[in-house]
């Protein structure tokens, strides 16, 4: 654990985050000097449910899933966060704990920023406050969409809706998630996901590029199928 040298570089961690890029020099320096970077291996725990949220997490590279296990050991995934995503900003003015565990899906690097620093910027920078509200509103919308997708009874339609929503979220036609994580995210069996992906590929709606890559090649057809 050390002060994040990468944040100081041009195009470094903090400068990549839209939320932070328009800050004044003094404000950016406050973030820089409070930022600590950590690296995690695949399947390593980054935070546990009920841990107090004291830092805002910025993902430098890799992916983090939030999840819980029921009494039978079944995993329920809440969200999947990718490079440049932030975690914990909804707790800045609250003494709040994590509701789920945070696990690295792959080798992952994060920057942790003291939320007291961000709170101070919010209090003195109205434009930044507005951006933060917009960011939180977007996350709330995404959460509601995820709940809507999971409630879809037809597994074929549910998978289509998930792929479409994920593509919109990352602003890319290529989705880098393996079938196991898609299955957990959609509350379906991995075998079901595999079959439905094969059906989507046979209809030339998607292309299975590799084990962890899915390319959407017919958005109109996917939109019609997902119906969301």
Image (spheres, rainbow, N blue to C red):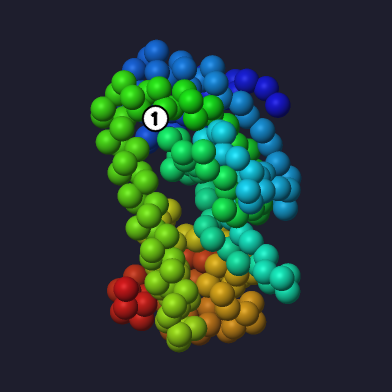
Percent coordinates x, y for residue 88 in the rendering = 50, 42
Label 1 environment density (alpha carbons within 10 Å; few <14, some 14–19, many ≥20):
some
In the depicted structure, whether residue 223 falls above or below residue 102: below
Which residue sits furthest top? 26
Taking 198 as reference, is 163 left or right?
left
Q: Residue 207, image x and y in percent?
A: 49, 71
Please say whether residue 157 is visible from this viewpoint. Answer: yes
User: Which quarter of the figure is the C terminus placed in?
Assistant: bottom left
Residue shown at the point (55%, 67%) measured from the top left: 185
Q: Is residue 199 above or below residue 182?
A: below
Question: Foreground residue, 220 or 120?
Answer: 120
Quadrant (top left, top right, bottom left, bottom right) of the N terminus: top right
Q: What x and y, as percent, mark residue 93?
A: 43, 35
Q: Foreground: 82 or 184? A: 184
Q: Position of residue 37 (x, y in %)?
A: 63, 29
Q: How many marks?
A: 1
Name the residue located 52 percent from the left edge and 51 percent from the top edge. 81
**What secondary structure is marked by label 1?**
loop
Q: Which residue is mark 1?
A: 20
Q: Is residue 20 above or below residue 152?
A: above
Residue at horizontal 67 percent and vertical 22 percent from the top: 2
The quadrant holding residue 38 is top right
């Amino acid at each position: 654990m050390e002060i994040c040298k990468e944040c100081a570089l041009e195009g470094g961690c903090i400068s990549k985050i839209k939320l932070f890029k328009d800050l004044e020099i003094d404000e950016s320096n406050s973030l820089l000097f409070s930022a600590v970077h950590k690296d995690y291996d695949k399947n390593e725990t980054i935070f546990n449910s009920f841990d107090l949220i004291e830092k805002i997490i910025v993902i430098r590279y890799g992916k983090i899933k939030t999840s819980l296990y029921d009494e039978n050991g079944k995993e329920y995934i809440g969200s999947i966060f990718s490079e440049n995503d932030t975690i914990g900003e909804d707790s800045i003015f609250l003494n709040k704990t994590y509701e789920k565990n945070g696990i690295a899906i792959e080798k992952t690097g994060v920057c942790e920023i003291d939320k007291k620093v961000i709170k101070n910027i919010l209090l003195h920078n109205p434009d930044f406050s507005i951006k933060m509200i917009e960011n939180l509103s977007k996350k709330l919308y995404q959460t509601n969409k995820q709940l809507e997708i999971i409630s879809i009874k037809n597994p074929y339609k549910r998978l289509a809706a998930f792929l479409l929503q994920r593509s919109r979220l990352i602003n890319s036609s290529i989705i880098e998630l393996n079938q196991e994580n898609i299955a957990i995210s959609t509350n379906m069996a991995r075998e079901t996901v595999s079959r439905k992906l094969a059906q989507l590929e046979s209809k030339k709606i998607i292309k299975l590029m590799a084990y962890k890559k899915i390319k959407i090649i017919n958005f109109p057809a996917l939109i019609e199928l997902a119906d969301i």
